[in-house]
Amino acid sequence: MSDCSTCEAPCSPNPQQHVSAAPMTPVRYGQIGSLFFRPNRLSFGESHDGHAHLIDHVSSVTKGSVRVEAHNPDTGERMSGVFVAGDKFLVLADFWHLITPITPVAEWDCVFAQPSDPGNLTGLFHAERD
């Protein structure tokens, strides 16, 4: 195993399938029990590609502030909100969302729970909709 160049965590040959953390071991990225953590860091003026997930997840802002834009696929409703360090927000399955920093640097963690029946998921890190 080697350190992942993006998250500095020990990785298996597939860097998207990270090793589970041992109890009482700090980890920034990967699996802890039945939870999966994905940290994100962007600077002002950047944004990740908007996307939707197959399952719900919670995001927790850890530094700075972000604007979240979302789209409900069932009603067509568009919504947005601003979240600051310490805030958490729910992203529902199938809701397209885009997160953009509104401070010089913003960091947030996305937290996914392993579904009891993962169905066709090949891994929580591949839970994005096509």
Image (spheres, rainbow, N blue to C red):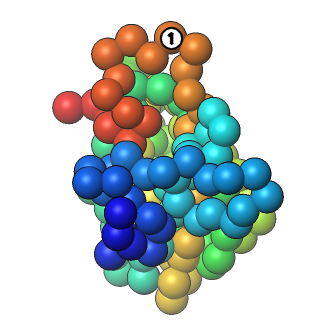
| x and y, in percent, of residue 26 in the image | 70, 66
- Side of 28 relative to 40 (left or right): right
Q: Residues within 10 Å of mark 1 (few under 14, many from 20)?
A: few
- Side of 20 relative to 49 (left or right): right
Say which quarter of the image contains residue 62.
Answer: bottom right
Residue at point 38%, 33% (across, down): 123
Location of residue 94 with respect to 25 vertically, above or below: above
In the image shown, does 72 or 22 lie closer to the viewer?
22
| x and y, in percent, of residue 11 in the image | 38, 59
Q: Residue furthest bottom?
A: 104
In the image shown, does 80 or 2 lie closer to the viewer?
2
Q: Which residue is mark 1?
A: 117
Residue at point 31%, 28% (across, down): 122
Can residue 59 be spotted in the picture?
A: no
Residue at point 48%, 26% (across, down): 55
In the image shown, does 111 or 89 lie closer to the viewer?
111
